[in-house]
Image: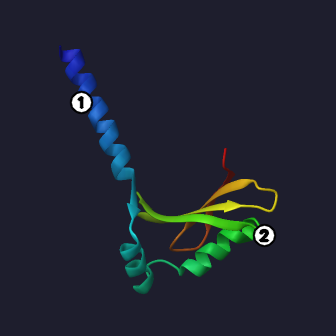
């Protein structure tokens, strides 16, 4: 019984830790952060992602908070129809990740 309790507790902590790691921010929160100057404009963040894949089209964007850092996620589709996931540091505008969506 102790093993089951320990396993259940560990599983609950893992799920909770995953939830705390990344938090989606709604449009109102994103606009407040932009207006306060905490994050860069969405135009600049989109431009940083598009610079990695010229002539691509943005299909979706999302602002998340990861461990206290604001990360802007951009989904792109290039001219060949290949989909890309680009993550941009919303404060600095630096591209953090750029990988093909599989």
Which residue is drawn at the image coordinates 66% and 76% (left, top)? 47
Direction right: furthest residue? 80
* SS state under label 2: loop
User: For residue 36, which quarter of the picture?
Assistant: bottom left
Q: Residue furthest left?
A: 1
Which of marks 1 and 2 precedes in the sequence? Answer: 1
* Mark 2 and mark 1: Cα distance apart in space: 48 Å
Residue drawn 77% across and 56% down? Answer: 81
Q: Nearer the viewer, residue 25 or 96?
A: 25
Q: Is residue 3 left or right of residue 21?
A: left
87 to the left or right of 82: left
Q: Disc number at residue 39?
A: none
Residue 23, position as x, y percentages in the image: 38, 58
Q: Quadrant of the N terminus?
A: top left
Is residue 35 toward the left or the right of residue 77 in the image? left
Q: Position of residue 64 (x, y in %)?
A: 44, 62
Q: Position of residue 34 (x, y in %)?
A: 45, 81
The label on residue 9 is 1
Q: How is the image coloured?
A: rainbow
Residue 54 numbered tag: 2
Pointer 2 local density, CA inside 10 Å: few below 14, some 14–19, many at least 20: few
Q: Nearer the viewer, mark 2 or mark 1?
A: 2
Question: Which residue is at a point 27% across and 35% down the rendered structure image?
Answer: 12
């Amino acid at each position: 019984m102790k093993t089951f309790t320990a396993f259940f507790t560990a599983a609950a902590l893992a799920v909770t830790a995953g939830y705390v790691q990344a938090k989606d921010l709604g449009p109102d929160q994103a606009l407040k952060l932009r207006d306060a100057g905490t994050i860069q404009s969405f135009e600049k963040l989109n431009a940083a992602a598009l610079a990695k894949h010229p002539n691509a089209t943005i299909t979706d964007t999302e602002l998340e908070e990861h461990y206290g850092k604001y990360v802007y996620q951009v989904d792109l589709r290039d001219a060949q129809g290949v989909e890309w996931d680009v993550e941009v540091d919303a404060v600095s505008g630096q591209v953090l990740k750029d990988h093909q969506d599989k």
